[in-house]
Image (cartoon, rainbow, N blue to C red):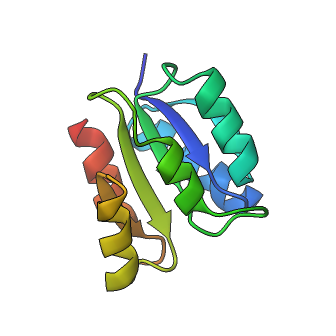
Amino acid sequence: MGLKTYIVEDNATIRDNLIATLEELVGIDAVGTAETENEARDWLRKDGQAWDLAIVDLFLKQGSGLGVLEACRNRKAHQKVIVLSNYATADIRKRCAQLGVDAVFDKSNEIDALVDYCLAQ
């Protein structure tokens, strides 16, 4: 059984490709997905113990990934939260660090680093 991964991404193509890539290269087990902040928060509240890794985009169909990150603040020590965004600026990285995010990756040029991070888990 792979790393139980929850993915919050509103673009279906990106989400499906990300899941396929991480299943093949890392062996993750995608346990759920969400396209909106409310959907993600509800799932995390209901299934809060059912994941090892959460991958969160910041810009969603409804709400923000920042709200999802806030919902992950009281997670268990083994649960890791990472941000995968096209907007991985210095300010965003700083805000994510303040919210307890374990890592931030840029969608456009840090996918290899994301894969390496997942392999290390």
Residue in view at x 27 percent, y 49 percent:
117
Q: Is residue 109 left or right of residue 43?
A: left
Q: Residue furthest left?
A: 120
Compared to residue 120, the image places residue 95 above or below, namely below
Compared to residue 118, the image places residue 106 above or below, namely below
Residue in view at x 31 percent, y 62 percent:
98
Question: Which image quarter: residue 83?
Answer: bottom left
- Quarter of the image that includes the C terminus: top left
Q: Position of residue 80 (x, y in %)?
A: 34, 40
- Quarter of the image that includes the N terminus: top left
Compared to residue 7, the image places residue 103 above or below, namely below
Q: Position of residue 94 (x, y in %)?
A: 30, 73
Question: Which image quarter: residue 114?
Answer: bottom left
Q: Position of residue 110 (x, y in %)?
A: 36, 70
Residue in view at x 27 percent, y 40 percent:
119
Compared to residue 84, the image places residue 69 above or below, namely above
Q: Position of residue 96 (x, y in %)?
A: 37, 64
Residue in view at x 74 percent, y 42 percent:
39
Q: Please state the total of marks drawn on the protein image.
A: 0
- Who is closer to the viewer here, 26 or 38? 38
Could you tell me if residue 21 is visible in this image? Answer: no
